[in-house]
Amino acid sequence: MSVYPRANTVLRRRDPDAITAFYEERSAAYQRKFYKVKDLPYPGLCFVFHGMILRGCEHFAIDFLSEHDYERVMVCDVLLQIAARLPQNYITRNSRLRGMWGPMERSSNLRFQLSRGKSFWMQVLLTEERFLISVNGYHFGAYNYRMPYPWLAAVAVRGDVQDVVIDTYYVGEYPIRLPHSLPRVIPLVYNPDASNILRDGNAKETEWAVVASLTKMSSKKFLFRPSIELPFYGCLPENETLFEGRALRIEGRVKLMPQSFSIAFQIGQEVWPQPTVSFYFSPCFVRNKRDKIGKAVITRGAYLKGEWVKNNVSRLTTSLRPGAAFVIIIACRTNHYEVYLNNKSLLLFRYQMSPSSVGLVNIRGDIKLWEVVIE
C-alpha cells in the first residue's frame, strides 16, 4: 500500500490537453514570482499568496516545484499546480512528473471566488497526507500528495497577475480567516409554531408553516432573491446555547445537479485540524437510474477525540431532490437530536456530547441557502 493515496496516478500520466498546453505556453512568458524553500518542509508549513488579478486576466498558475533552479520552472517536476482559468470559472489542480501530467482535478463545493481587476488571497497548507487550499479566506479543497512533500524546493507564480507577495510560516490551524469569512451570528427567534413541533412533533400549525415556506421558496419571484453565501459559518448569540426545546431551522433549495451537502454542529471554525463535531448530517445524491426519485444516501455521525463515532450511512426515500425546496429542522430532545424534513421526522441521533458545547454551525455543499435561525 502506498504512503501517498494518489501516488498511483503516475501510471495515468499523459501529454497536456490543448487548453492546458495553450495556457502553459502563454503563462511561461509572464513569470511573476519565484520563491526558494530554504528548509526541509514539514506538515503545518503554510504558504500565503496575495496579489492583483489583471483586468484582462485569462489564466494564472501557482507551481510547487521540486527544483531550486529558476531556469527549469517549465520542465522540472511539479508536486502541485493550482491554475485559475477565469473564462471557464474554475481552478484546476494537477501534478507533473518527468514532463507528463496526471489526471486533472477541478471540482469544488466552493463557488468561484476570483474576479478580474480585484485582489486575490490564497493559502496552501501542507499536512501529513495532502495539500489544503483556501481562496479568499474559505476552504476550497484538498489535493492528495502524488509525490513526497519533502521534494518541495521552490514555488513559482506566473500568468496574468501582478504585485504578488508570498509569505511562509507554520500554523496550528487552517484556514486563516479574513473579515468577510468570519462566522455570522445566527438569529434567535421565538416561533410558537416551532414550539409545538418541539413539544409533540405532530402539530398542524407547524405543518401549515412549513407548507407556506415551501410554497414561498417555489415561487418565481423568490428564485431571484439573493441567497446566503456558502460555506456558511454561524455562531450562537452571546451567552446562548443549545438545549432541550431549541432547534435549528434551515430553509433552502437543492441545486439542479447536486452531489451532496452537509450540516455540522461543531466546536471551532477551523478545517484543520478536524474540529470536534457533535452532530454531522450529510445527504449524498445517488446517480443511479434504478434508484427512486428523491432517494439519498444519508450520513450522520460525530467526531470526538480524533475519530468518527456512531457513523451511520443509510438509503432513505426523502423529498430531497434536484431543484426542490426544503425546510430542515434539527431539534434538541432529552437525549438525542431529531431531524425533520418538510415537517416529517427523518431520523434520530443520540447525543455523543452535550449540545450546550456546540458553538458553531457549518453548512456547505450543493444547495441555495435562504434562511438559518434558532427557534
Image (tube, helix red, strand yellow):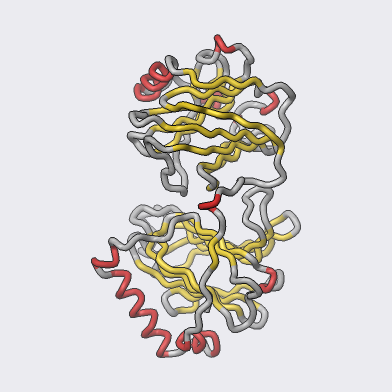
Left or right of residue 301, residue 27 in this image: left
Between residues 163 and 234, which one lies in front from this camera angle? 163
Q: Quadrant of residue 29?
A: top left
User: Residue 336 lies in what quarter of the image?
Assistant: bottom right
Q: In x, y percent, where is residue 304? A: 72, 60
Can you give x and y, in whole percent of width and height, for residue 99 in the image?
A: 51, 15
Q: Is residue 11 or residue 262 the one in the foreground?
A: 262
Q: Is residue 17 left or right of residue 175?
A: left
Instruction: State the residue in front, 187 or 147.
Output: 187
Tell me the quarter of the picture where residue 147 sits: top right
Which residue is found at the position 56% from the left and 41% from the top?
142
**49 relative to 10, above or below:** below
Give how far across and how far down residue 33 sits, in percent: 54, 21
Is there any visible trace of residue 182 in the rendered image? Answer: yes
Left or right: 206 in relation to 72: left
**x and y percentages locating residue 280 in the rendered image:** 59, 63
Please say whether residue 346 is visible from this viewpoint.
no
Q: Give the vertical position of 158 relative to 181 (above or below).
A: above
- The residue depicted at 43 percent of the width and 43 percent of the height is 113
How many numbered circles are shown?
A: 0
Q: Is residue 18 above or below residue 93?
A: above
Residue at 41% across / 59% down in the picture?
367
- Tell which residue pokes out farthest to the top in this image: 71
Locate the N terminus and report the quarter of the image it occupies: top right
Closer to the camera in the image, 363 or 165:
165
In this rendering, the answer to whether 207 lies above or below 298 is below
Furthest-left residue in this view: 220
